[in-house]
Image (cartoon, rainbow, N blue to C red):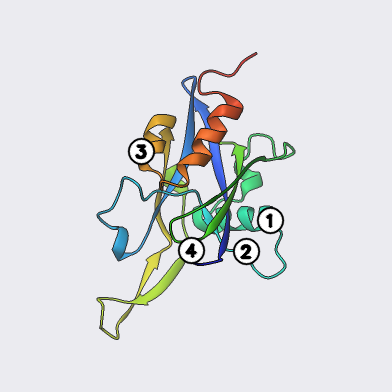
Amino acid sequence: MSRRISAGILLYRRHDGELEVLLAHPGGPFFTSRDHGHWTIPKGEPDDGDELLAAAAREFEEETGHALAAVAGDPAEPPLDLGSVVQASGKRVHCWAVEGDLDPATATSNTFEMPWPPGSSRLRTFPEIDRVTWFPIEEARRRANASQAAFIDRLAALVGTGPRSP
């Protein structure tokens, strides 16, 4: 079982009075035709010496092209700690939620290289994340990685799913 750790941000907003979350679809050739159950929070592994929240913010920027402080509704508001989950791969994922907004059309991701097609010596470049999208809570639960759906449930329990209370 892997002991890897990852940290990420679940960006959320209220749109037409309903709670929505921003999820990311993995890039690369293995996820081209995979959808439900494969969306994820923008996340990644911390560098040596990184605090997990700092790593989560850095990975959010790398995978969306937007600094977290630039899309947060109130950058001074502390993120909500949604705890952690262990994925089927054994990776422990830590997550924080931040209220904010981001236009998915402006999102850009970092890239990686891999030989493609398999067995060839030709290196191709792929985005780590090929798109981000806002989803209402119920749809987000269906699209998200099964273990990460717990973060969506935890967020909904903390902030509610309907219009903001006065």
Real-space CA distance between mark 4 and mark 1, rounded to the nearest whole angstrom: 18 Å
**Residue at the spot of label 2:** 46
Q: Earlier in the sequence, mark 4 or mark 1?
A: 1
For residue 143, what is the image quadrant? top left
- Between the C-alphas of marks 1 and 2, the distance is 8 Å
Q: Is residue 58 visible?
A: yes
Circles 1, 2 touching at the beta carbon (< 8 Å): yes
Q: Nearer the viewer, mark 4 or mark 1?
A: 1
Q: Nearer the viewer, residue 30 or 132?
A: 30
Which residue has dot 3 on it? 142
> Which marked residue is nearer to the observer: mark 1 or mark 3?
3
| Marks 1,3: beta carbons within 8 A | no
Observer-nearest of 79 and 61: 79
Amino acid found under the numbered disc labelled 3: Arg
Distance between mark 1 and mark 3 Cα atoms: 28 Å
Cβ–Cβ below 8 Å for labels 4 and 3?
Answer: no
Residue under numbered circle 4: 110
